[in-house]
Image (spheres, rainbow, N blue to C red):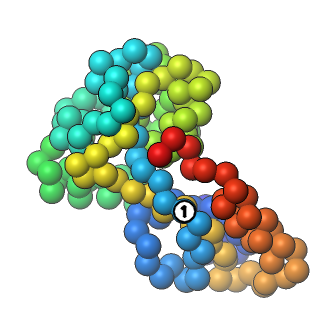
Amino acid sequence: MENWLEEGRVDLALLFRHSIDDKGGDIYLRDTATFLVGPPNDPLTANPTIEFSEINGIPLTLFCRPSSWRDRLDVLARRYDIELNVVLEADSLSLQTHAVAADKCYAMLGAYASESARNLLGLSVSRIIAPGIKRYLALSMSPHGQLTLAIKKVKELIKEVSEKYPPGFE
C-alpha cells in the first residue's frame, strides 16, 4: 500500500505505523496493542496477557520481507534477547490465522485481526506485554494526489468511523 501511495496508484490508504512521527501528513486515528494468536484452548495463550520473552523460540507465522513490521520485531527480539522462530511467511491474514488454526504455529497480530480470528476460527488470544507492542493506525494520502471533494469526504468518513468503533478488545 505504501508503494501504491508513493506511485500515485491510490489516493488514500489505512496503514499501521510503528510510531507516531511525521510521515508526510499522516492522520493518526488510534493505537492498538499486538496480540499473540494461538490455536483454540492453547496453554500459551490461555491468559489475557503474555510477556514478549515467552515468545522465544515458538513457531511463528509473520509477514514476508521486506516489512517494516518484521524489522521492528527483529529489533525487539535482539533487544530482549529472544529468537523469533519464523516457520511461515505470509502477507495474508487469512493464511496466517488458518495456519494457526491448523495448530502449526502462532501469529502476532493487531486487535482487529486477533478479534476476528477469535470470533471466526475460535483461536485463543493474549495481549503481548513487557514490552507492549503498539501499532498506530494512520490514514495516509498519496503525495501525488489532489485533495478533491471526494477525497475530503472519504477522509472525514474514515475519521468518523475510527472514532465511533473501538479497536477490539483492549
What percent of the width, then of the height, locates residue 87?
33, 31
Which residue corresponds to the image point at 66% horizontal and 59% vertical from the top-left? 162
Neighbour class for label 1 at 10 Å: few (<14), some, many (≥20)?
some
* Image coords of residue 68 (percent x, y): 40, 60
Query: Can see residue 2?
Result: no
Quadrant, the N terminus: bottom right
Q: Is residue 101 left or right of residue 148?
A: left
- In this image, 165 relative to 20: left or right? right
Residue 124 or 164: which is nearer the viewer?
Answer: 164
Q: Which residue is more in the foreground, 143 or 44?
A: 44
Type of amino acid under label 1: Arg
Q: Residue at x 61, y 50 (%)?
A: 166
Classify 111 as above or below 150.
above
Residue 144: image location, x then y, percent: 70, 83
SS type, badge 1: strand
Residue 50 in the image, given as x and y percentages of width and height: 28, 36
Residue 141 seen: yes
Identify the residue position indicated by label 1 in the image: 30
Question: Which residue is rendered at x = 65% and y = 83% of the image?
Answer: 143
When asked about the image quadrant of residue 38, the answer is top left
Q: Residue at x 55, y 83 (%)?
A: 24
